[in-house]
Amino acid sequence: MKKGLLILASLGAFGFSAAGEIKNPIVKKLLEKGVITKEEAVELDKETPVFSKSKKLKFGGKAYIGYTFTDKNNGADAGNFEVRRGYFVTKYYFNKKDHFRFTFDVSWQYHKEKDTEGKEISLKVKHLYLYKDISNFIPGTGFELGITHTPWLDYEEHSGWWFRSISKTFYEASDGAHLLPSADAGIDFKTKFEHFSAEYGIFDGEGYDHIGRADKGNKPNKPMLEGRVTWHVLGGGKKKPKPLSQTYANISLHALNSYNHRGSDYDFSVLQFHAVYNQPAFLIAGQYLQANWDDPNAKDNDGKGYSFNFELRPFLNNKLAFLGRYDKWDARGSSYDRKMYIYGVAWHMNKYVTWIINGITVDYENDSTKDYQKYMITAELHY
């Protein structure tokens, strides 16, 4: 029995001991009950650290769960419950800033073998990197090395478009500009000051879900250079903002060049301007984007467009939001010209759960067979 209780205490440990003081509450209770001796308690307390109170190991994540009904202009309508995304994040800190991060990415997608087999849950690694602070050498700067963030999308999703659970940003969405994802293999530098921030790096250039992709030719992989600079007009550049309680205004420039993109004979480049203004009662954001890729088979990704989105938060201490977004993409291939409208209402129930009811309308200007409407109910979970 005593041995079993010692094992239980080891598994349920909650702290470290120092100078003979018992900090593990389970060990302390066993000692108080006379189940173990003082010497056993001290020894056990030394050997059983807990991570729930550890400053070194941290867990977190988010999930997007809901129901979507799709009304297609050409094809069968469909309605499904969905686990759209799940992110499980683990960080281990070596000191106050330096850490290792590992992120599992759970997604809902069509079966890899055959679309007619329906959808399946896919598990991928989205982030796996070392973060190293180098502010002693370059003020306000650190870097990620491994499968890292890329300079644009994480910034926009935490400043201008807060509803990733219902749609990706204009830059990434398949019916927006449909360019690149938010993570890639490479090295990503981050510089942060109160009124200025920048993110810049060298990457493989295909995205974390297509590392080494060469589907447009046989050229060997060459790197992608990408960067973002942001003027934080009202300050706040050192931390991610809290839109329901803070006021901020940012103006950003984003650019990249991917050499021999996706194995082709052509380089791919992007130039983007973005601005956002937020106060607790509302948010307004807009961007203009131009992408150039001369590959004759890449008529979808070569083009220009713009996006505008807003939130109005008039009720419940800004926790109830009316939201809208308009995307316009003009591609080199005219059959890919499209518009997307997003509209809905969100209720931030608490810091863990946000409920969203929304619709999405997609209009392909020269190919109505691709048009559709979506009606969605979403629970966005943070933990």
Image: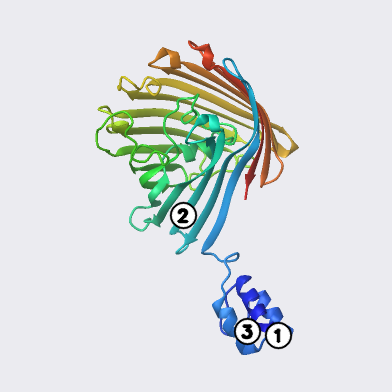
Label placed on residue 101: 2
Q: Which one is earlier in the sequence, the residue at label 2 or at label 3?
A: 3
x 55%, y 80%: residue: 46
**Disc 2 versus disc 1: distance between alpha carbons?**
40 Å
Q: Is residue 28 above or below residue 181?
A: below
Picture disc at residue 41 = 3
Q: Give the foreground label among 3 and 1.
A: 1
The amino acid on which the numbered mark 3 sits, given as a three-letter code, is Ala
Which of pointers 3 and 1 lies earlier in the amino acid sequence?
Answer: 1
Amino acid type assigned to the residue bearing label 2 in the image:
Arg
Q: Position of residue 175 (x, y in %)?
A: 50, 24
Q: Is residue 69 visible?
A: no
Classify residue 33 as left or right of residue 308: right
In the depicted structure, whether residue 86 falls above or below residue 41: above
In the figure, is residue 28 to the left or right of 110? Answer: right
**Quarter of the image where one finds residue 68:** top right
Checking the image for residue 35, the label placed there is 1
Which type of secondary structure does the marked residue at label 1 adopt? loop
The quadrant of the picture occupied by the N terminus is bottom right
Is 114 on the left-hand or right-hand side of 184? right
Residue 27: x %, y % from top left: 66, 79
Q: Point out residue 239 in the picture as x, y percentages from the top left corner.
A: 51, 47
Residue type of the residue flagged with mark 1: Val
